[in-house]
Image (cartoon, rainbow, N blue to C red):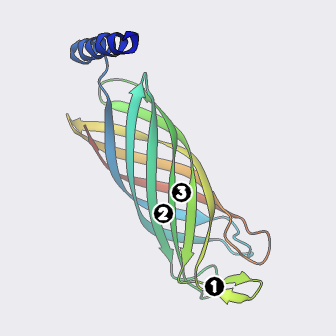
Amino acid sequence: MAICMLLLTSTGLLRAQATSPRSPALNGDIAVTYITERSLKAGTSDTFWMEGGSAELAFNLIHGVGVAADYTSAHASSIGNSGVPLTLTVITFGPRYRWRVDKRVSVYGEGLVGVASGSNSVFPSVSGATSNANSWAWQAGGGLDFRVAPHLAIRALDIGYVHTGLPNATNNAQNILRLGAGLALRF
């Protein structure tokens, strides 16, 4: 009985908070960005660029603290001077903090973890080489958004550091600098 009373009371309080003009409502954004990534020595002496896109879903939970999920896919026609192509897909999620500088400008920082999938390439293994491989991944980064309409923002900068553990015949580690820009729909 006490639990029922507590649930009924808290439901009313939550409803009152959601309709209060001063309380922040749950909000978020869906962002689509063009990205370019610079691989920083992925087991070779050469670095190389990849190009692709990213889709991100984020929710602010309370006072700028929230969560984000990111799906990024990028492609390089050649890893360094090798002539071997690479398609890299990274799916990550984790905490994000957003600071609203003013009504139009906000910045965010995030730390995300997840998985990486390399395909259409050559990955060494104990039994030879394969064209696909998977590993864990993490990324740390942030961005700068400019609101241009009530539900639309320009993501002027999306910058991050991505680390993956795909097989590469040396240390099985890849370090990637990520740069991007795009649009964010706010809700």
First-in-chain label (3 vs 2): 2
* Residue 26: % across, % down: 32, 28
Which quadrant of the figure contains the N terminus? top left
Q: Position of residue 108 (x, y in %)?
A: 47, 36
Q: In terms of secondary structure, where does tag 3 sit?
A: strand
Residue 7 x %, y %: 34, 16
**Residue type at numbered disc 1:** Val
Residue 27 placement (x, y as % from top left)? 31, 32
Amino acid of disc 2: Thr
31 with respect to 109 (left or right):
left
What numbered label is drawn on residue 28? none
Q: Which mark is residue 122?
A: 1
Answer above or below: position of 57 versus 173.
above
Pick whichever of labels 1 and 2 is earlier in the sequence.
Answer: 2
Residue in the picture at 29% in, 14% down: 8
Q: CA distance from mark 3 to mark 2?
A: 6 Å
Which residue lies at the image location 61% right of the left edge and 53% below the top edge? Answer: 138
| Residue located at (73% from left, 82% from top) | 125
In the rendered image, which residue does mark 3 sit on?
178
- Outermost residue, front side: 1
Vertical order, 185 against 3 (above or below): below
Q: CA distance from mark 1 to mark 2?
A: 21 Å
Q: Name the element at disc 2.
A: strand
The residue carrying pointer 3 sits among few (fewer than 14), some (14 to 19) or many (20 or more) residues within 10 Å by Cα, namely: many
* Residue ID for mark 2: 36
Q: Of 60 and 181, which appears nearest the observer? A: 60
User: Between disc 3 and disc 1, whose residue precedes?
Assistant: 1
Residue type, label 3? Arg
Q: Residues within 10 Å of mark 1 (few under 14, many from 20)?
A: some
Position of residue 47 in the picture relative to residue 69 (left or right)? right
Q: Residues within 10 Å of mark 2 (few under 14, many from 20)?
A: many
Quote the CA–CA distance across marks 3 and 1.
Answer: 22 Å
